[in-house]
Every structure is written in structure tokens, then in C-alpha cells.
Image: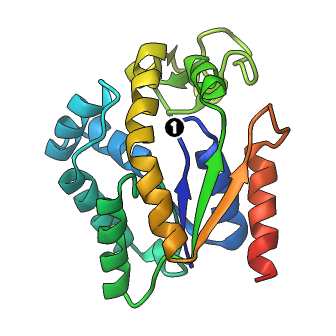
Amino acid sequence: MYLVLLGAPGSGKGTAGKVIAEDLELAHISTGDLFRENLKNETELGKEAKQYMDKGELVPDEVTIKMLKDRLAKADVKNGAVLDGFPRTEVQAKCLDDMLNEMGTKVDMALNIDVPFDEIVERIANRRSCRGCSEIYNVVFNPPKVEGICDKCGGELYQREDQKPEVVENRLKVYSQSAEELINHYEKAGVLYNAKAGDSVGKTSFDIAKEVEEYIKNN
């Protein structure tokens, strides 16, 4: 089974995806993690991606697609995967369709998580990441025991460039420009599942994950 996660940056799709992947025994493939791995290892693809990520812009398709192709070839994807962060454009969606078709499979569900943008800006602006182990905290909802220090490894917590409010607002603008055509792509394919989340509707990422799992089991 292949499940695609749609939703703006900070909508909680990463958390929902991890829960779904673990419960359904699927690989969780986050393009953000792929980018950060390449950044940490200072690969050529990583250096190229960083130029765009720091400004809140989309990484060019050819860079993202190469990373994803390598990841889909790994052994832990044998049962399928939850894709988080790819596709982000209709061009990428069609490319993914072609990749999966070559593997004899397809996208079974596109989960679209809808959260108001004002909530997202506040969420991301409060995030802090560990320089050591990449653990993520929220200074309001999930703060570390000691300010500025990671609970898990004792590393320094910092605010990534792409988490600053002005960059987040640009990321949301970029997302909006391509979101409609991407949603339409999966709606036409008959695999779109819309779910509303956020404080305003009283649903967390965990609630959405369980809702989706129940839907999959019954369909």
C-alpha cells in the first residue's frame, strides 16, 4: 500500500504519517528527512537543496526525485510506504505515478490534512530542533525539561531558518500555489481523503491517523 500525505507545512501530516506507517507496518518516507540527511552528510544534492530550503522555496523536482528513487529501492519498502512531503506539485504526482507503475503498484490513498494557516504559522514559529539528534520540540505544547537543551541527547536546541515566521509565511504561499492542482489530481484518481485537523476543529494528528486507519480497514 502507498499512501501520500497532503497538507501545508506544519499541518501535522508528519506525525500522522508516522503513526499510520507504524500501525500498518509501512515505511515512512519523509522528503524533509531525506533532505536533512543529505545536508548533514554535505552531499552535492544536499548542498543544492539547502539553497532553496533556507528561503522557504521548493527544492527542484530533479533533486527531490533522485533522492526518492533511491529511497524507494530500499528493502524496508517491501510492504509499501507513507510518503510525506512528496509529491508537492502535479508534475511530481505524475512522476510518482510513473515510478510506482514501473514497480507494479500505485497510490492507494492521498490523505489531505486541512489546518488553518494562522494556526500553522504559530505552531512552526514555536518549534525548536536538536542539533544532535534532530528531535523536535514546541516551546509551548512540548517544551524540553531544560530550556534550550534536548531531553534525549543533551544537544543544543535551535530554530531552523525554515521555521522562522517570515519564511513559514512564504512556504505557505508556495504551498497554496500548487496545492489545488495536486488535490484535483488525486480527486480525479478517486483516492483523495479529506480530513480537517487543528485546534479549531478539535482534532490532533493522532486523531486523524486513527480515523484513516479505521477507514482503510473498512474499505
Depicted 73 relative to depicted 52: above or below: below
Please name the residue shown 65% across and 64% down the image: 193
Depth check: give the residue in front, 74 or 90.
90
Residue 121 on image: x %, y %? 57, 22
Q: Tell me the quadrant of the picture where the C terminus can be found.
A: bottom right
20 sits to left or right of 93: right
Residue 173 on image: x %, y %? 42, 31
Please name the residue shown 32% across and 70% down the image: 94
**Which image quadrant is residue 201 in?**
top right
Tell me the SS state at disc 1: loop
As drawn, the residue found furthest toward the top would be 147
42 sits to left or right of 212: left
Residue 19 on image: x %, y %? 70, 56
Residue 93 on image: x %, y %? 37, 65
Depth check: give the residue in front, 180 or 209.
180
Amino acid type, callout 1:
Pro
Q: In this figure, which colouring scheme has been used for the structure?
A: rainbow
Depth check: give the residue in front, 197 or 102.
197
15 sits to left or right of 56: right
Q: Tell me the quadrant of the picture where the N terminus can be found.
A: bottom right
Please name the residue shown 47% across and 74% down the image: 77
Total label count? 1
Depicted 108 relative to depicted 135: above or below: below
Depicted 64 relative to depicted 203: above or below: below
Depicted 101 relative to depicted 201: above or below: below
Residue on which the image places disc 1 = 9
Please name the residue shown 60% across and 15% down the image: 149
Depth check: give the residue in front, 209 or 21.
209
Q: For label 1, count other residues whose C-alpha is less than 10 Å away and answer few (under 14), some (14-19) or many (20+).
A: many
